[in-house]
Image (tube, rainbow, N blue to C red):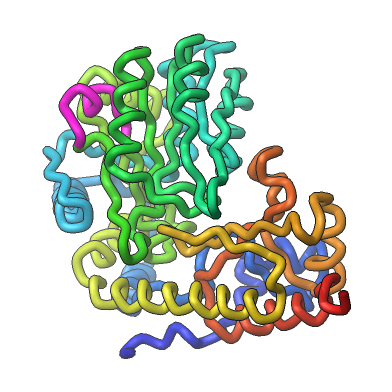
Amino acid sequence: MSYNFDQVISRIGTNSAKWDGVVNSLGNDMIVLSVADMDIQAPPQVVNKVSEMARHGIYGYTDAFPPYYKVVQHWLDKAYRWDVPQEWIVFCPRIVQAVSIIIERFTEPGDRILMHTPAYQPIANAVDINHRKLVESRLLLRDGRYEIDFDDMERQMSAGVKIVLLISPHNPTGRVWTKVELERIAELCIRYDALLVSDDIHADFIHEGHEHTIIAKLSEQIAERSIICTSPGKTFNLASLEIANIVIPNMQLRERFQLGLRQAGIHNPTFFSIPALEVAYTECDDWLNELRTYIKDNISFTEDFFAEHMPELKIVRAEGTYLLWVDCTALSRNESDLIEWIQHKSRVSVSFGSSFGVDGEGFIRLNLGAPRALLQEAFERMASNYPLSNR
């Protein structure tokens, strides 16, 4: 392996939402496996480009010019075999911002917006903060794998749903939706005249035996009512540079979204974002392939460790993302018990399930985008304080 993903680098003192946020509130002895950014340096090619740009010394206003659209177009084709015209691509700093603008532009207060739960809460919160009604279609956990309850989804949509917010691959469960599942979602959106907004930010981490499908590729009918959100943020660990690619095939929808961006005062990329994206998308394939292997090995390490030391906890097998969703209900369905064990006694910060809605209670989400030594120390702490170890 030519890239050193094992290097542990302190992020404390970098205004890290993940590390400084936890350390400031809980103490500097915490190990943090919560917020979904990686504790692995961005590709060296990107680091070099950002350093080069920093040395320029003039950090004035920037814009998205044709090379940006060409690079994104090339990436969509290379990564997902999705050939799109450049004019479909719209720059937006963050996917959550884009979703909030979409909700504001394409729905009215009180309109119903559907998500599959447990769900990534910043997207769900965008519904509530815009005074729309979140409709939860609960995923079914069958034999250790989450499935969409299409009967429930259709019942909800037949009562009126303006937007379906799809997380693909799914966060926190790690599901990679099959083409058949996506076809059924598309069919329902068409039948009940709903806009489909798909957050595909984790699409570059798809594990062996699974394949990511962009739902807008399925047919012209679903493409015309789809908005697909992509970003290099998760893939190359660039979250704070704030750049997302919002792909909107329908010209009328695209123009309304662009007007919403202008009304929100969103127009200029940050000085570093586009240069970082361009290098990441064109020069870092080897880095990404090695990282995928490292993440796969982290998942295997975690599964083996839990099976040996905390066997009552059931890991939901991840099909995509660098996250793991863990069923802790054999230990307790009371989240306060999990907080006491993991956070207070073990001094490890994870994402507790209730933050993904009521269907997440009794579960935790682990971020495995980290050096393995960091994971090992966290898991050893958890195992040494494991409440069932002496039973």
* Viewer-proximal residue among 191 and 344: 191
The residue that appears at 20% across and 55% down in the rendered structure is 75
Residue 251 visible in the current orientation: yes
In this rendering, is residue 191 above or below 304? above
In magenta, the rendered stretch is 218-227
The residue that appears at 29% across and 74% down in the rendered structure is 289
Residue 318 in magenta?
A: no
In this rendering, is residue 165 above or below 291? above
* Viewer-proximal residue among 304 and 213: 304
Whole-percent x and y of residue 173? 53, 51
Whole-percent x and y of residue 115? 51, 31
Determine whether, in the image, residue 289 is placed left or right of residue 388. Answer: left
Whole-percent x and y of residue 164? 43, 26
* Viewer-proximal residue among 274 and 96: 96
Residue 220 in magenta?
A: yes
Determine whether, in the image, residue 13 is placed left or right of residue 145. Answer: right
The residue that appears at 35% across and 41% down in the rendered structure is 229
Q: Quadrant of residue 339?
A: bottom right
Determine whether, in the image, residue 208 is placed left or right of residue 82. Answer: right
